[in-house]
Image (cartoon, rainbow, N blue to C red):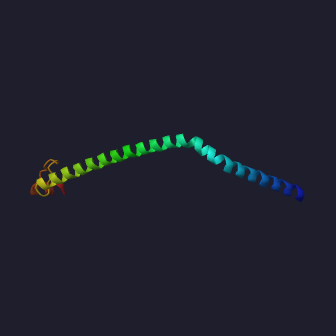
Amino acid sequence: MALGGRILGGAMLAGAAVLALGAVVAAPRLLKAARPALREGLKRGMRFYEAAREGAAAFAEDVEDLVAEVRAEMTAAPPGEHASEPAVEQPTDDESSLAR
């Protein structure tokens, strides 16, 4: 039984060595053949990155504009009121005592 295990282990080791040698020999050929596909993938990735970057810049600009508009409204409105909110009537003393 031990002899069969050693033979099987040796065969597996020899198979792994042949596979590694084949990979070393075939790798340059495979990379050369795959080069056009890799270049196309990189081009697409770079185009996507640029489009996403432009979209993010436009979004950031829109948010900055919105914040500037809100700040302008807040400084133009009297303290305690916001220009976009309707004025709320304050209850009189009689009405506030009824609510309690």
Residue nearest the observer in this picture, 88 or 98: 88
Q: How many marks?
A: 0
Residue nearest the observer in this picture, 67 or 41: 41
In the depicted structure, whether residue 79 falls above or below residue 41 = below
Assign the N terminus to one quadrant of the image. bottom right
Determine the image quadrant of residue 98: bottom left
Residue nearest the observer in this picture, 5 or 75: 5
| Apparent side of residue 76 relative to residue 68 in the rendered image (left or right) | left
Q: Residue at x 85, y 58 (%)?
A: 6
| Residue 90 shows in this picture | no
Percent of width and height locating residue 13: 78, 55
Percent of width and height locating residue 97: 14, 57
Assign the C terminus to one quadrant of the image. bottom left
Percent of width and height locating residue 10: 82, 56
| Apparent side of residue 67 relative to residue 77 in the rendered image (left or right) | right
| Residue 19 shows in this picture | yes
Q: Residue at x 15, y 52 (%)?
A: 72
Residue nearest the observer in this picture, 53 or 15: 15
| Apparent side of residue 47 relative to residue 24 in the rendered image (left or right) | left
Q: Residue at x 75, y 53 (%)?
A: 17
In the depicted structure, whether residue 22 falls above or below residue 5 = above
In the depicted structure, whether residue 29 falls above or below residue 74 = above
